[in-house]
Image: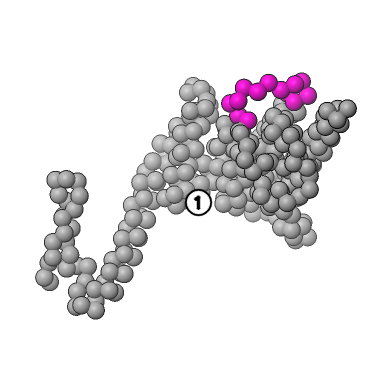
Amino acid sequence: MAELDRGVARQSRIAEATQAKDRGNARFKAGDWPGAVGEYIAGLAALPMRPRTRVAVAGTGTDADADTDTASAAAVEDEEDVMSTTDKGKARADGERPREKEEAAAAAAPVEKPHELDNQDNGNDDTSNDPAVCMLRAVLHANVAACRAKQGEHKLVVESCTEALVDDPKYTKALFRRAQANEALDTWSSLEAANKDYDTLLSNVDESSPDARNAKKAQRLLAPRLEEAKKKEMDEMMGKLKGLGNSVLGYFGLSTNNFQFTPNEQGGYAMNFVNS
């Protein structure tokens, strides 16, 4: 009887989260990004919270029952709908925003991080690791990321995609979307993270697939940007260190120009004092 009750509760939570996701998809297609985020987060709140320590579902080979398969397929299909709407440009342009009231309501909604969702009393039971629950949770986070991308909030895109990948580490769209967001952030560390996501994606998909081709193309274009960002940040760091060194050495009538570094045969550098 208890097992039956748990099964009913599980289906009820999945149904509630799915309904919220459907409402979010409708808002997304209408170009209401903040409203869509609010619905997706409502869906996340309806699901059992993720344990603080858990084993990733992806790649475990766990078999799901028929209901799980149906729920998972529906979740993936709906996420595809959100992506196709984005790709085809059916929604509003990025610069448009709904009225201030809806912006404020979305801003007041809880942020889509597990540790904040953990504070809600939605029952941390054994269904939190259910494959259907994990799949739906991953899709909801990925859909939040799609909204954040429309709003140009690249850091939040990275955060939401990261949450999706906790539940499904091989989630191709989340990997690709996070990589694109990190590219948009355009720092040395973010570009390195993007390159790593492309590597992960390529290890998960067939090398002849469109996803693989897109990832390889993105990496080719990323390589010179990554090298340029690395050089720029290294130069900035060395400039700051030089400035700090000059401020200290100035007390002794010296500067960093008095110290010359030349490469040696061991792969290091030899320091020579130059009296200028």
Query: Where is residue 17, by image quadrant?
Result: top right
Residue 82 spot, x, y in % from top left? 69, 37
Q: Is residue 259 visible?
A: yes
* Quadrant into which the N terminus falls: top right
Query: Residue 120 at x, y = what percent?
Result: 76, 50
Residue at disc 1, secondary structure: helix
Q: Which colour scheme is used?
A: one colour
Tell me residue 271's x, y (percent): 16, 59
Answer whether residue 103 is visible to the viewer in this image: no
Q: Which residue is drawn at 49% across and 38% down?
A: 197
Magenta span of residues: 57-69
Q: Which residue does the image show at 48% across and 35% down from the upper left?
A: 198
Q: Does the magenta stretch include residue 214?
A: no
Q: Where is residue 8, by image quadrant?
A: top right
Q: Position of residue 93 (x, y in %)?
A: 65, 49
- Above or below for 169 versus 261: above
Compared to residue 105, the image places residue 122 above or below, namely above
Image quarter in which the C terminus is found: bottom left
**Residue at 60 percent of width and 29 percent of height:** 58
Mark 1 residue crowding within 10 angstroms, few (<14) / some (14–19) / many (20+):
some
| Magenta residue check for 66 | yes
Q: Is residue 272 left or right of residue 238?
A: left
Disc tally is 1
Residue named by callout 1: 185
Q: Which residue lies furthest to the right in this view?
A: 1
Residue 54 horizontal side relative to residue 48, left or right: left
Camera-nearest residue between 35 and 260: 260
Residue type of the residue flagged with mark 1: Leu
The outermost residue toward the left is: 275
Taking the image as shown, residue 217 lies to the left or right of residue 276, namely right
